Image (cartoon, grey):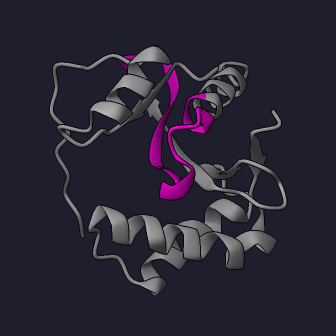
Amino acid sequence: MSQILHLAAAADIDRLLPMIAACHAEAGLGSDEATRRAGVEPLLGGSPHGAVWFIGPKMAPVGYIAVSFGWSIELGGMNGNISEFCIREKVRRRGMGSEALAALLKALRGADLKALHLEVAEGNARATGICERAGFRRRRSALMTWAA
């Protein structure tokens, strides 16, 4: 795909879970180990519902990006949702997030994806800027969630 993104596989679970835990803690998410594991294991095992890529050098990744796939009648086909996009705080502001996002968009464009969505926290100007430079635009709707 690119030099910045590397598809994560089942053998990478022990490298990925601590990264997810750190990013969730930073974001104030109250997830636990069992929930994180249940959420990521199928994606690492080849599930058609999504995938996870490491960001940065293959042997020493600095972050990850997870995409889940769905279907949109409105958009006429498969669409994706960036469910997690995190780079370690100490290596941010070096352009790796922008580079990773550009590489991901290029790859997914070739997979006939009609749209890619992501949620940016209100007031996160840095993340909003990265997304806008990559071509993302705000929609008029508000994300609403029901959780079991």
Q: Nearer the viewer, residue 53 or 89?
A: 89
Query: Residue at point 64% right, 50% down?
Result: 51
Q: Is residue 43 left or right of residue 4?
A: left
Query: In which quadrant of the rendered view does residue 113 lie?
Result: top right
Q: Is residue 126 above or below residue 111?
A: below
- State the image coordinates of residue 103 (x, y, percent, origin top left): 69, 28
Q: Nearer the viewer, residue 106 or 147?
A: 106
Quarter of the image for the N terminus: give it. Answer: top right
Q: Is residue 61 above or below residue 118?
A: below
Is residue 86 magenta-colored?
Answer: yes
Query: Residue at point 66% right, 19% down?
Result: 109
Query: Residue at point 24% right, 70% down?
Result: 148
- State the image coordinates of residue 146 (x, y, percent, origin top left): 19, 57
- State the image coordinates of residue 83 (x, y, percent, origin top left): 44, 49
Q: Is residue 27 left or right of residue 52?
A: left
Counting every numbered tag in the picture gives: 0
* Residue 67 visible somewhere in the drawing: yes
* Residue 49 visible somewhere in the drawing: no
Is residue 92 magenta-colored?
Answer: yes
Q: Is residue 25 above or below residue 1?
A: below
Query: Residue at point 70% right, 73% down?
Result: 15
- State the image coordinates of residue 9 (x, y, percent, origin top left): 78, 63
Q: Is residue 68 above or below residue 17?
A: above
Q: Is residue 139 left or right of residue 92?
A: left
**Which segment is the magenta one?**
73-98
